[in-house]
Image (cartoon, rainbow, N blue to C red):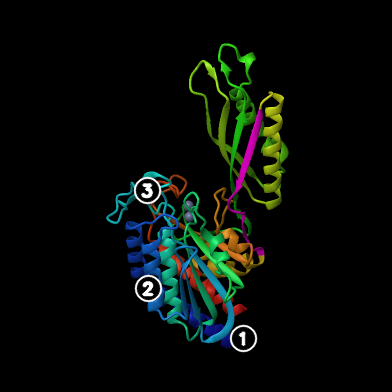
Amino acid sequence: MNTDTAERASELADRIDSAAEGVEAQVIAWRRDLHANPELGNREKRTAKIVAEHLKSLGLDEVRTGVAHTGVIGVLKGKLPGKVVALRADMDALPVSEEVDVPFASKVRTIWNGEEVGVMHACGHDCHTAILMGVASVLAGLRKQLRGTVKFIFQPAEEMPPKGEDGGAKMMIQEGALQNPAPQAIFGLHVTSRQSVGTIGYRPGPTMASSDRFGITVHGRQTHGAAPWLGVDPIVTAAQVVLGLQTVVSRGIDIAREPAVVTIGMIKGGVRENIIPDSVEMRGTIRTFDEGMRDDVHERVTTLAEAVARGSRASCTVCIEKNYPVTVNDPALTAEMLPTLQRVAGADKVQFVPKVTGSEDFSYFQQLVPGLFFFVGATRPDLDPSKAPANHSPRFHVDEGALLLGVRALSHLTCDWLAAH
Ligand SMILES: [Zn+2]
Ligand SMILES: [Zn+2]
């Protein structure tokens, strides 16, 4: 960079910061409004309308609505030639009843998968949506100095669509979210209770786990509980399957390379004490940080359960439903953008964070475009982040200082990346 371009870059950086400060109050207001009016996955109609109207009011070059049900895509072309960066925010809330005492707490209730539930932005997607709307304001105001094109992706149903429906990042991609124009880099963020407000967390490579659900049904043969030899007991067999599954990770997986988790979270069988039932049903989740290990764990869970059942003269069916892939931050992109994050938050506020066994469908975008997904601390400075109610808790609470940092981080990442490419 020669002195001239360096000067222009720092002038643009100053403009981003003052524009971000200028929209902060508006971003907070958007976030509170979205927080008080949360919508579940594939139902983000009001949210999407607010987003689309805002993007149109900024005079973006294109605003597409109804992508993957309720998704919105905005395209902003800078006056200077350059490449394309995509920024993604998720818009959906969770079936959680809010217990936080704030004036804009959610009182919304709805029907979800056949049950009446409270609705709450318990994962902070209200913040992500408000932040990206703010970034759109900032960058639209700097259009004359902006190099290249910015694509704003507002995505529904990150927390999984309702039963029987498609949705989320995968469906947005199927409906062309990464085409016309195709981005060469993508950025996304998540607010987190695990870090204090003012900090940013990052990690190159595998960062969040793949997440797969599975069900195992053990088929035995019903008989009297007093005469077990006359039947095949699926309860004892299921117990052996559960214990056997504990060896999949502990004895079979190279945990020095990547960790993995196999959990049985539900087990159901039998109706009374003196009847050995016909079958037992179990459900669980599998988390890995490597796609090869993911396939290996699936194969081990299946063959182990089948073999244990056979050894007990029972049989079993294993059904694994693949959900989100591993969230992998492109190592080169992460290294390249780290100085930007350090400049924005302050070098001592940017933390290299451990892997997260939660999952993210941002991973689908990263499978096609080099991407960086990072964390923005949201816990009040006077609280210990390790004890603060976590994302998804009915008491999850975001310190709104996180919003301005989020707007600045995404705006600077975008301009720095476009300037360097
Ligand atoms: Zn979540
Ligand atoms: Zn989330």
Residue 65, placed above or below residue 255 = below
Give the structural element (helix, strand or loop) at label 2. helix
Residue 281, relative to residue 340: is it above or below? Answer: above
Q: Does the image show residue 21? A: no
Ligand 1 is within 8 Å of the C-beta of the residue at disc 3 = no
> Mark on residue 111?
3
Q: Which kind of residue does numbered mark 3 sit on?
A: Ile
Q: Which residue is mark 2?
A: 53
Q: What amino acid type is highlighted by mark number 2? A: Glu
Q: Which residues are magenta?
A: 315-331
Frontmost of labels 1 and 3 is 3
How packed is label 3: few (under 14 Cα within 10 Å), some, or many (20 or more)? few
Pointer 2 with pointer 1, Cβ within 8 A: no
Q: Which is nearer the eye, 359 or 316?
A: 316
- Does residue 134 appear anywhere in the picture? yes
Q: Is residue 330 above or below residue 261?
A: below
Q: Nearer the viewer, mark 3 or mark 2?
A: 3
> Which numbered circle lies on residue 2?
1
- Closer to the camera, 89 or 347? 89
Q: Is residue 239 magenta?
A: no
Mark 1 or mark 3: which comes first in sequence? 1
- Residue toward you, 385 or 262: 262
The N terminus sits in image quarter:
bottom right
